Amino acid sequence: MEMVTGWTGSTAGALQAALRLSNEAFAAHLGIGVRTVAAWHQKPALRPQPEMQQLLDTALTQAPAPARERFTALAGLPGNAGKNLPEADAGTGDDDAAADAEHRLIADQNITSALGQLDQLAGWEPGTARRQVAARLARLDRRYLLDRASRRRGIGQRRMAHALGEYYRGQGAGYGRYGARCGQDGDVVTSVLTHPSWLDLDCPLTAGHDRLTLDGAAAGSAVPLDEGTADAAAQRLAETLAANTRFVDTPLYRLVGVSIGKSQIAGSLALTRFATYALTLDLLEGELTDALTAGIAPKAGSLPLRDRYLPDLASVLDVAARLCAGGALALCAFARPAGPYRDYADYVLLVQERSGSVINAAGQLAVIPKGFHEPMTDFRNDARIAATLLREMEEELFGREDIDSTLTEPHAADPMHPARLSEPMRWLTDNPGALRMECTGFGLNLVSGNFEFSCLIVVDSDEFWYRYGGQIEANWESSALRQYSSLDREGLAALAGDDAWSNEGLFTFLQGLRRLKQIGGDRVDIPAVEWEVRL
């Protein structure tokens, strides 16, 4: 049995991890020097000599089946890579899907933009990235991608949070992961790194309080890719094409500096591109979940991409020195009147199940709306968190496809002009006081270093739900939409303990419940939420 693509330092390290051997034990297992094994770790793109390739082939062939499965996950190879199958059997899936992927590689301008950025970041000659991605695309087994997606979905919120707690253990210095007790038994902890001064902000998202600004003079944060990270980025693009995942290379805000205090969020932003984020920091979640499915302990040396980009909490917190993209998400609470089959007035709380077509939190529970913090046409004024939330409400709840950058090119000079608003949004803006938006907390998600602005959106007039409740419908980013009553104490406590949450979604949900309990009056019967910053 031979690997079709040949061995590299990275895949040799993956085999070592799959066999769960130290450098010394792995060297003895192969009958080589320890320095050779160390060189593979130092230079992940290094191609071992032919005799070494044969030794690695033999070691993989003779490895126990569980170790071969772990190797397949860690090396990012098709599901039959660890089996004695002829190359012709490693099919590329449906012919039409393969043709579509090849066409996108040539004709999709967003993919072309990403390939250009990969060439630049990796220091390659123009066109190298396209050739690299084409070679990987030809070898990809789409069935493997589906199976891997199923395995990744099996890694719940608790395991992710625990794994990241282990990786960064002992580095708190006042910061820690957001945890909370919801009701009597709902004890949870997330991967969101926060600080007591970043919680319970009660910050109105209005002028004078919502004070993020665009710093046009901020220096770039793109870190040149080494051979290992460039290889991972090329693999990501190939998998994006093979899975027919939506990929739009829009501008994103990245956080340069932040000042968080009671009733005020301030800081500076610069611009980056979605492709730069997708090919670097966004790879960390997949690396971690693949390691967990393979039974690999999360620690320095076992997660090469994390070791490169976010090796410690100091690098997580130093947002100015790295690419820190992220977004705003909010728990929505719509006042609802009593009706013929419900003799009480309450708030409807909305929770989404994320679809498999999204980049972040695919297949997980999240609040809605949830979106990247990115500009539309007014790069300076769109820096406010309120701008992102209003846009995401229009897009994810009120059916505005013309502002969904994944579906259409932006042509309107002012996409959020009153004349273009949906009917529900126009009603909210025409009735002062009907819509309340607050920031309830801030954190940095250890999964990929993203910044997270946790928010609460409250519509206090139950006339809105009477008029427009039937028009609220999630877009393609959700596979399903759930509603909960603010008077369902037991149901909300049980929901808080659901392992299907995304970490940032759970953070926002709990902070939103905590604030709504304070301001909701007779419409709420919410279990107490007591947060704790866990080092």
Image (cartoon, helix red, strand yellow):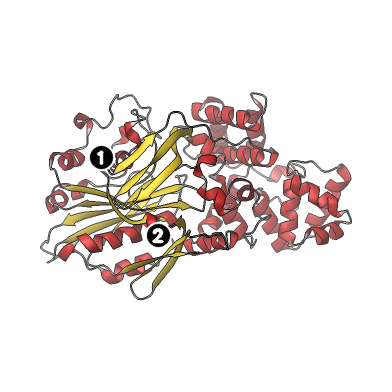
Position of 56 with respect to 488 (left or right) is right
Does residue 42 lie above or below 290 as drawn? above
Q: Residue 519 versus residue 216: which sits nearer the camera? A: 216
Residue 390 x/y as whole percent: 28, 41
Q: Residue 194 location, x and y as percent?
A: 44, 56
- The location of residue 520, given as percent across then percent down, is 19, 61
Residue at numbered disc 1:
207
Q: Is residue 288 above or below residue 403?
A: below
Say left or right for 325 vs 77: left
Residue 146 in view in this figure:
no
Please name whichever residue, 26 or 513, is drawn nearer the observer in this view of the structure. 513
**Do labels 1 and 2 touch, CB within 8 Å?**
no
| Residue 493 in which image quadrant | bottom left
Q: Residues within 10 Å of mark 1 (few under 14, many from 20)?
A: few
User: Could you tell me which secondary element the residue under label 2 belongs to?
Assistant: helix
Observer-nearest of 119 and 138: 119
Q: Residue at x 71, y 42 (%)?
A: 88
- Three-letter amino acid code at disc 2? Pro
Mark 2 neighbour density, 10 Å: few (under 14) some (14–19) many (20 or more): some
Which residue is located at x 41 percent, y 49 percent? Answer: 452
| Dot 1 or dot 2, earlier in sequence | 2
Q: Which residue is mark 2?
A: 196
Q: Residue furthest bottom?
A: 184
**Helix, strand or loop status at disc 1:** loop
